[in-house]
Image: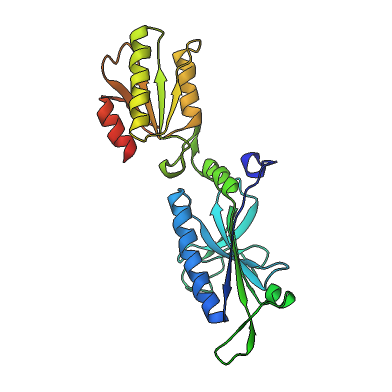
Amino acid sequence: KSGLLRGREFSMKDLYSFHRDHADLEAYYAKVIEAYARIFTRCGLNAALTEASGGPFAKYSHEFQVPAPNGEDVIFQCSGCGYAQNKEIFEGQAGARCGKCARGEMSERKAIEVGNIFMLGTRFSSAFGLTYLDEQGAAKPVEMGCYGIGPSRVLGTVVEVHHDERGMVWPAAVAPFRVHLLALGKESGVIARSDRAYAALQTAGVEVLYDDRLAVSAGEKFAAADLIGLPLRAVVSARTADRIERRARLDAATDLVSLAQLTAEAKS
């Protein structure tokens, strides 16, 4: 169901915080929101901070929702300030004026949830008798927060957002490899130059996926490179001589560069 978004494997990054009072919890909660926003931005995702129900854990929560046509969630988001609410708690209707900025209109959008955070308060600390002694020696309940990101869900969302008709287009920060190196031809010179390029890139700390298959045509290798969608494609063939044909995944044009130039670009 839903392709990569509903794979059998699901991983979760969980974080819990413990605080002496609600003000401290709120301050830390705001820091997590900022940190999560930076994480999703680096992953190439424009995640909207979305007000949502807290379910059985809290009065309310915040979700990080990435608008996408194949999303399983529905959010209402302001066209002006970006304020968003999950459909489950939204009391207005599409086209209504935003209750936060009073300028933009709330539009209905499909989205994918990539993170969720809660202020648990004393719900669980009280249940377990978790307290601390304040300056006067009085026992006070500990306030708690809960924060989660699904890394496997994030990767599926990256693919849903970043792709074209040929395949995936990985943002550099989360690409499984930086360079897809293709050896075209069975000539010993081509293989030797490809092997040297592979070794040099690895020595420089560049992650490389090396396609040195001899029984596969050039067209099949190009199609596989587009499908996998790594940031840079590098081709070594008899035609490139002592240079390497370089193409960024979204570029239509190719150019010939030296191994040093390719390495510098890949590292940057």
Q: In the current view of this chain or complex, which residue is farthest to the top?
A: 187
Q: In the current view of this chain or complex, which residue is farthest to the bottom?
A: 136
Colour pattern = rainbow
Q: Is residue 38 above or below residue 31?
A: above
Drawn side of residue 104 relative to residue 246, left or right: right
The residue positioned 36% from the left and 36% from the top of the image is 205
Which quadrant holds the N terminus?
A: top right
Image x and y of residue 43, in percent: 46, 48
- Asked if residue 69 shows in the view, the reply is no
The residue positioned 37% from the left and 30% from the top of the image is 202
Q: Is residue 60 above or below residue 157?
A: below
Drawn side of residue 26 relative to residue 240, left or right: right
- Asked if residue 33 shows in the view, the reply is yes
Which quadrant holds the C terminus?
A: top left
Image x and y of residue 25, in percent: 55, 75
Image x and y of residue 156, in percent: 57, 43
